Image (spheres, grey):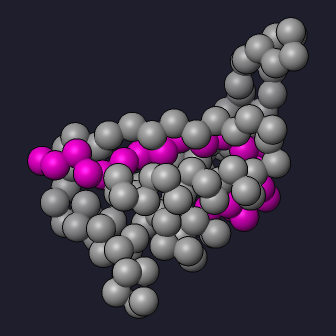
Amino acid sequence: MSTQYRLILCTCPDRDTALRLADSLVEERLAACVNLLTGLTSVYRWEGRTQHDSEVLLLIKTVEARVEPLTERLRQLHPYEVPEIIALPIVSGSGDYLNWVSECVNAVEQDS
């Protein structure tokens, strides 16, 4: 299985922000699908203090060629000064699903 597919992790401060970001990424064909995981508590260090915050985790499915523009778009839209944006390779998966991911995000090239 090719590793051209990517899973992007990105945390958001609330569900409304997460939905807004997810809608933008899917509408702009940077992502095929975005899952929102609510009920997440993040513990992290920021500005010299340990923080505890409720967040929503985005699980974003895309292809390698879309990672850079997707990352830039998240930076533009995200309210955090330093948003979490982590790309992981998808090394295996349902062929039908991964083909669908490709079709969704590559349609922008076909529309041009």
Q: Where is residue 78 in the image (x, y as percent from the top left)?
A: 75, 51
Q: Position of residue 54 (x, y in %)?
A: 78, 33
Can I make out residue 39 in this image?
no
> At 63% across and 69% down in the image, what residue appears?
23
Residue 17 lies left or right of residue 103; in this view the side is right
Instruction: Name the quadrant of the C terminus.
Output: bottom left
Residue 30 lies left or right of residue 14; in this view the side is left
Can I make out residue 65 in this image?
yes
Most extreme residue toward the bottom, as rendered? Answer: 111
- Residue stretch rendered in magenta on the structure: 1-22
The one nearer the camera, 69 or 30, is 69
Most extreme residue toward the left, as rendered? Answer: 1
The one nearer the camera, 75 or 103, is 75
Is residue 3 highlighted in magenta?
Answer: yes
76 versus 96 height, above or below: above
Q: How many labels does the image show?
A: 0
Q: Position of residue 41 (x, y in %)?
A: 71, 27
Residue 103 lies left or right of residue 34; in this view the side is left
Q: Position of residue 35 (x, y in %)?
A: 53, 54
32 versus 44 height, above or below: below
> At 34% across and 87% down in the image, what residue appears?
110
> At 80% across and 41% down in the image, what residue appears?
80
Rendering quarter of residue 10:
top right
Residue 59 lies left or right of residue 41; in this view the side is left
19 versus 103 height, above or below: above
Rendering quarter of residue 104:
bottom left
> At 16% across and 49% down in the image, what residue appears?
2
Rendering quarter of residue 76:
bottom right
